[in-house]
């Protein structure tokens, strides 16, 4: 998407979160709220992003790094004032500017793109994202003229009885023509009870100028939920969880308990794979077809699981490649390892991958059998068709087709416990 700039509002205090941290650096499914908002914009095809920061801006800048430009709003004097702080990035530019809130982390990129596309295609100086809600909620009401143009946005507290019946409401997300926005910002004033500069007044200025102003209704009200407090954080987490799980099921994955399965963003799972309850799968994991995962499994970052593999109960895997048809049935930890096809990992087996300073890799060949309660001290390599006796601690490589036994010889001391 060319000639489009995005402004993400991230300067507010968020006092209702009751936290020492900015509310925008609290996480949903492992990602900060502000990071999710920016990533959604970039997934919509907009790479030129400006974050308006103020309160606790160091925390936000630490999260976003150099992935965005920054505008500083030292005093919170309204949404219009926040956009004014971006003037050096907008001056002399042509095209469109998308403006959205940094505390709306589960917006679909497709929705943002749809908003911008309509503004371009319909040649609208202002296009606003709206929501239709059956209940009376304290959001600004959208007033259309007889031709369907957006005439103004009336704040809830200023509505008359007829206006309160309007179901289409403002969400605080806009796409403006950059040149017209620059002109309108110069005409804003703070002649109101709050002594603030309102971005909603820009739309009225554009309409009165005779410009084309429109709206687009969001398809799913859940995606425009914002975060104010920790209850909102939980609600959005649940909404994202259900969205991800539902999409996976539509694509042929069986999830036995949609409410108690936690699959993060950007996870790939093949069709006819079954996910049992209380399973967590982190971002970036790739799982093949016809696999069985869980229950109570924890699939961490960097894992690739081939077709027909089984990851069972109380198993944790991290940075592991699991071959086709391989089984890790229960009570095991497989970290930093590469396991070949059709291998069986016995109960209680662990890869000892960390020596306190460095992490090392374990390699297990195809069609091997690892007995229960085995410790594999990395770095170590087991060949194909290797067999490890239960209870062994393996410190040396095991050749192909070999049996490894690493136990201390048993000694029985008869009568030793009679006087204990």
Image (spheres, grey):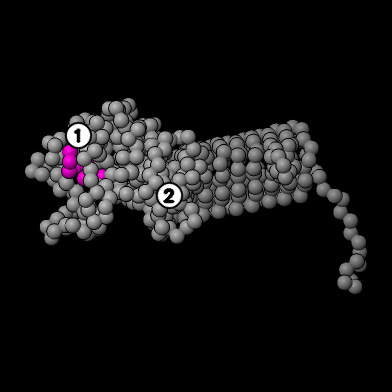
| Residue 418 placement: quadrant | bottom right
| Residue 358 placement: quadrant | top right
Q: Which mark is on residue 124?
A: 1
Please indicate whether residue 107 sits to the left or right of residue 327 in the image.
left
Q: State the residue at coordinates (56%, 49%).
A: 298
What residue is disc 2 on?
55
Task: Report x, y in % for residue 62.
Answer: 50, 42
Above/below status of 162 relative to 67 = below
| Secondary structure under the numbered disc 2 in the rendered image | loop
Of all residues, the one furthest to the bottom in this rendering is 419
Magenta region, main secondary structure: helix
Q: Which residues are magenta?
A: 199-206
Task: Report x, y in % for residue 157.
Answer: 21, 59
Residue 119 visible in image: no
Of callouts 2 and 1, which one flags the residue occurring earlier in the amino acid sequence? 2
The stretch drawn in magenta includes residue 200:
yes
Q: State the residue at coordinates (19%, 32%).
A: 122
Q: State the residue at coordinates (49%, 45%).
A: 58
| Rendered-image quadrant of the C terminus | bottom right
């Amino acid at each position: 998407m060319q000639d489009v700039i995005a402004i993400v509002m991230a300067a507010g205090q968020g006092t209702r979160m009751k936290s020492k941290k900015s509310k925008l650096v609290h996480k949903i499914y492992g990602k900060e709220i502000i990071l999710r908002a920016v990533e959604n914009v970039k997934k919509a095809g907009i790479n030129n992003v400006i974050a308006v920061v103020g309160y606790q801006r160091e925390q936000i800048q630490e999260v976003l790094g150099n992935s965005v430009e920054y505008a500083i709003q030292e005093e919170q004097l309204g949404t219009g004032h926040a956009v004014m702080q971006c003037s050096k990035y907008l001056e002399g530019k042509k095209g469109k500017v998308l403006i959205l809130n940094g505390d709306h982390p589960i917006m679909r990129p497709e929705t943002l793109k749809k908003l911008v596309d309509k503004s371009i295609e319909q040649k609208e100086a202002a296009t606003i994202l709206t929501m239709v809600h059956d209940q009376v909620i304290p959001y600004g009401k959208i007033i259309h003229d007889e031709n369907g143009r957006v005439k103004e946005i009336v704040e809830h507290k200023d509505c008359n009885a007829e206006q309160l019946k309007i179901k289409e409401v403002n969400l605080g997300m806009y796409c403006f023509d950059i040149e017209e926005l620059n002109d309108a910002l110069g005409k804003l004033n703070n002649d109101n009870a709050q002594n603030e500069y309102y971005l909603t007044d820009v739309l009225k200025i554009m309409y009165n100028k005779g410009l084309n102003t429109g709206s687009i209704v969001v398809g799913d009200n859940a995606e425009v939920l914002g975060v104010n407090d920790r209850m909102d954080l939980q609600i959005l987490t649940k909404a994202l969880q259900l969205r991800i799980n539902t999409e996976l099921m539509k694509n042929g994955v069986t999830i036995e308990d949609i409410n108690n399965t936690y699959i993060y963003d950007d996870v790939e799972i093949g069709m006819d794979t079954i996910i049992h309850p209380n399973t967590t799968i982190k971002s970036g994991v790739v799982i093949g077809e016809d696999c069985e995962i869980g229950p109570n499994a924890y699939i961490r970052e960097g894992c690739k699981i081939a077709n027909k593999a089984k990851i069972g109960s109380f198993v944790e895997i991290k940075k592991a490649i699991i071959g086709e048809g391989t089984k890790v049935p229960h009570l095991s930890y497989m970290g930093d390892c590469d396991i070949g096809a059709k291998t069986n990992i016995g109960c209680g087996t662990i890869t000892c991958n960390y020596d306190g300073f460095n992490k090392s890799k374990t390699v297990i060949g195809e069609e091997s059998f690892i007995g229960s309660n085995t410790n594999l001290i990395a770095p170590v390599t087991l060949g194909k068709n290797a067999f490890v006796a239960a209870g062994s601690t393996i410190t040396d490589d095991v050749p192909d087709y070999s049996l490894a036994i690493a136990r201390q010889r048993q000694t029985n001391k008869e009568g030793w416990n009679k006087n204990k």
